[in-house]
Structures are given as C-alpha cells and as structure tokens.
Image (cartoon, rainbow, N blue to C red):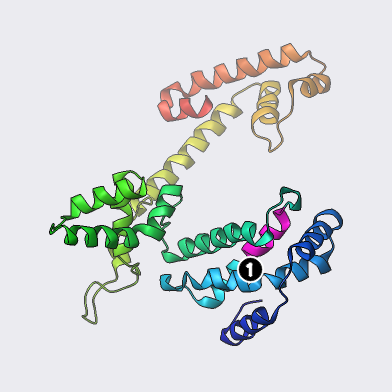
Amino acid sequence: MPLDGTVDTAMSRRAMKAELLDAETELKLAYAWRDHRDEAALHRLINAYMRLAISVAARFRRYGAPMNDLIQEAGLGLMKAADKFDPDRGVRFSTYAVWWIRASVQDYVMRNWSMVRTGSTSSQKALFFNMKRVQAKLERQARARGETLDGHQLRALIAQEVGVPLADVEMMEGRLSGNDFSLNATQSSEDESREWIDALEDEGAQAAELVADAHDSAQLRTWLAEALQALPERERYIVRERKLRDDPRTLESLGEELGLSKERIRQLEASAFAKMRKMLEARGREVYALLD
C-alpha cells in the first residue's frame, strides 16, 4: 500500500510504541519463522524492529527522496533480513538487519536519483554516498595547511581516499553536479521555440529508402516466384514444403509421402535450388543472396 504523509506519521508512532525484544524472545521468533514459517512470529519480529528501519531511512532524507518511500524500502529490507536471518549464527537480529535495510534504501535512492543510471558497481555506490563528505573533509584539511586544491588534485585525492579509480570520481562528479532535463523542454523562451527532442537525428529509414526497399522486395518476390514456377512439379512441391511453409516438412516425411528415400529428396531439393540459382543469376546479386 502506498504511503502518504498521514500513514507515515501513524507508522512512526506505532513503531515507537512497539515492544522491545530481549535476545531470548528474538531467538524464539526467528526459529519459529525459519523452521515453521510462523507468520505471527514474523509479524512480531518485523514490528519490533520497524523503528530501526525508520531510523535508517531517515538518514537518507538529504538525497531528496520522499520519506514515505524511504520507509517503504527500509521495510522491504527488514523483511528480506528476517527471511534470510540464521539464528544459529549467534548474532542479534538487529545487527544483521541493519545491512539489509541500508542496502535496500541505498538501491532505492540510486534508482530514483536520476533517469540515467547513476552507479552500479561497489565503487560507484561508495562515491555516490560518500563523495561530498570526503570532498569537504579534504578541503578542510587543505585549508588548515594553507593550501588550495584545484579540481584535478581534489578528484585525485578523493579517488585515493575512497579507494576507487579516478575515472569513477570524474564520472560521479558530473552526475551529481547536474540535473535531468526533459527532451520536451523548449530550446529558448520564445513561444515558437522548438523542443530539444526535435533536434535529435532520426536514425530510422527515410521515406525514400522505405519506398525503394518496398519496390526491391516486390521485385525479388516476383523473380523468385517465376523461378519457382519454372521447376518441374515434384521439385516445386519439395521446395514449397521445405522452405515456404511456416512449419517446414522433414526430408523423411516427404520421402514417405512421395515414395522416395530421404537421400533422394535431399538430391531433388539441391537440384531445384541449383536450377533456380541458374535462372536468377542474371537478375543480380540480391536475388542470389536471397536463395543462400
């Protein structure tokens, strides 16, 4: 169910009032869900840690995503954690769930940051969520030393600090510094200004090319039909059954129908194609290629 502002507030209030599970109760609920698929146990476990999901989601509000959507994604991450949690490992569920919640919210933020895919590798994700913080830290350190970093120096230091290639830093800087623009936006403020989409080159075939192709295709079909009609009846029948049906016949089925061996049918088919090629050689290379 989509969340609106009202549901967001109500959910937050319910989450704050949810029970706090001790380690023993948490373990029992986890076993009940893992071993017996007890939905009541799962529901209780999820409700108890929804406040954790909301807390993680709130850390990503600065990226401009609606808080309601962030909470939804955090809840999905929490449910994934509950489904994959192994209570035998001796780890508290909250410790395990944080990773899944954060990963789910991060993926949502990156999917919706831009219509252009912002990042897919681990280094790009690290840059997306840490680049501004690292950049601010490096600039503060430089000012404390009385230094001024130019753009190239700063990008190189960011790459070194985060442990990613310099090319990824340059790419991410460009993605974070700009906004998406609609292709339907006008190129200027004038009333008759054309839209940007009108400036894109049409990669499709032009009208003249379409007419020429249609003419050539019709001519090829005519030549092919004439060559086929010139074959002896039995060979013409074999070609039609083998090449012109939606469900081509096999050599064996044709041999049974005509009282011939499979090898004889193959020979007649090859002979028919040789005759057609000979008749069509004078028509041009396009027809010859069509038969190959």
Residue 93 placed where, x, y %? 68, 59
Q: Nearer the viewer, residue 126 or 245?
A: 126
Q: Nearer the viewer, residue 217 or 80?
A: 80
Q: Nearer the viewer, residue 155 or 291?
A: 155
216 relative position to 100: left or right? left
Quadrant location of the N terminus? Answer: bottom right
Q: Is residue 201 visible?
A: no
Residue drawn at 67 percent across, 69 percent down? 49
Mark 1 surroundings: few (<14), some (14-19) or many (≥20) residues within 10 A: many
192 relative position to 103: left or right? left
In the image, farthest residue toward the bottom: 6
Which residue is denoted by mark 1 in the rendering? 75
Residue 236 is drawn in which quadrant? Answer: top right
Residue drawn at 38 percent across, 52 percent down? 204
- What is the magenta segment's predominant secondary structure? helix
Residue 27 placed where, x, y %? 78, 59
Residue 30 placed where, x, y %? 78, 59
Magenta-drawn segment: 76-85
Q: Nearer the viewer, residue 51 or 21?
A: 21
Q: Is residue 247 above or below residue 15?
A: above
* Three-letter code, disc 1: Gly
What element does badge 1 sit on? Answer: helix
Q: Is residue 128 above or below residue 242?
A: below
Q: Is residue 94 visible?
A: yes
